Image (cartoon, rainbow, N blue to C red):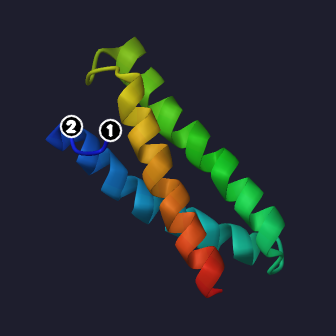
Amino acid sequence: MFVKWQRDKWKHFFVGIILGSVLYLISIYLVNAQPYLAGLVSVLTLVMICYGFELFSKFTGKGHYEMMDAIAGVLGGLIGIGALWLVL
């Protein structure tokens, strides 16, 4: 699956890693260092941002709507969140 990804999908994937990591760090700060709740909040926010960006592209015409872009971003974000969760 990953080998056949186009360059655009990899970009969404790597940006998702950064986005997920930042969202998790912000969530840890906001929920007073409760890792499970922070993980849930950051995953839900990640999904909303990734899919929301695709919806924005679809309805404004500023970009190309493709569900696989959102999925690639979420997968990357989950890796970023998971890595930080293990470290912290």
- The image quadrant where one finds the C terminus is bottom right
Q: CA distance from mark 1 to mark 2?
A: 6 Å
Q: Which residue is mark 1?
A: 1
Front residue of this view, candidates 77 and 64: 77
Circle 1: element type: loop
Residue visible at 51% across and 31% down in the picture: 52
Residue visible at 43% across and 54% down in the picture: 76
Which residue ends up furthest to the left in the rendered image?
7
Q: Position of residue 9 (x, y in %)?
A: 27, 40
Q: Is residue 18 left or right of residue 5?
A: right
The amino acid type, in three-letter code, at marker 2 is: Lys
Q: Is residue 40 left or right of residue 73?
A: right
Q: Is residue 61 above or below residue 39?
A: above
Is residue 22 in view?
no
Q: Position of residue 50 (x, y in %)?
A: 48, 39
Q: Which residue is mark 2?
A: 4
**The image quarter in which residue 68 lies:** top left
Q: Which mark is residue 36?
A: none
Residue visible at 64% across and 48% down in the picture: 45
Circle 2: element type: loop
Q: Is residue 54 left or right of residue 86?
A: left
**The image quarter in which residue 37 lies:** bottom right
Q: Position of residue 31 (x, y in %)?
A: 82, 71
